Amino acid sequence: RTYGATMLLATYDKAGPALHVIDPSGTSYRYFGAAVGKGRQLARNEIEKLKLSEMTCREAVVEAAKILHRVHDDEAKPFEIEMTWVCDESGKVHQRVPADLLTAASTAAKAALDEDDMDE
């Protein structure tokens, strides 16, 4: 069996932002939101619930952090979130999400999950 990798490709051109998933066979699909790797199905389900076309990039970062915390299945093992974006706020250039925004998003995600746990 051959080994392969799935790649996410984010672009920004005259038509606006776009996200493509390229699978190991080389097939490319365009998405509004996508997930790959471990936990991808649960993450995809959560992404499908979002109205991404109505969100700002900052709001999407918070929602992405919530999804990452939700699908992380080993609560005892800490993990670090790294995010990048291509949007008007980044000057239409691919770059890391600012650290202060990422920290705030992760904190908000943890608080939202804790609140959901209390409701159950």
Image (cartoon, rainbow, N blue to C red):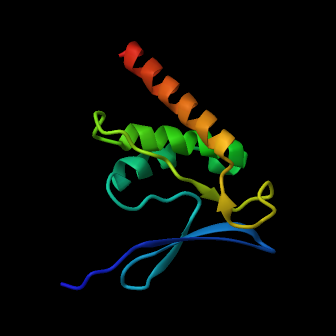
**Residue at 43% across, 85% down:** 26
Residue 47 location in percent, x, y?
A: 50, 48
Q: How many marks?
A: 0
Is residue 111 among what the camera can see? yes
Vertical side of 50 occupied by 89: above or below:
below
Residue 66 location in percent, x, y?
A: 50, 37
**Residue at 40% across, 62% down:** 36
State the residue in front, 27 or 86. 86
Quadrant position of the C terminus in the picture: top left
Vertical side of 24 occupied by 12: above or below:
above
Q: Is residue 58 left or right of residue 47?
A: right
Residue 15 location in percent, x, y?
A: 77, 72
Residue 19 location in percent, x, y?
A: 59, 67
Is residue 55 among what the camera can see? no
Quadrant position of the N terminus in the picture: bottom left
Image quadrant where residue 35 sits: bottom left
Give the residue at the far left of this rendering: 1
State the residue in front, 53 or 60. 60
State the residue in front, 2 or 31. 2
Image quadrant where residue 68 sits: top left
State the residue in front, 66 or 15. 66
**Residue at 68% across, 66% down:** 94
**Residue at 74% across, 67% down:** 93
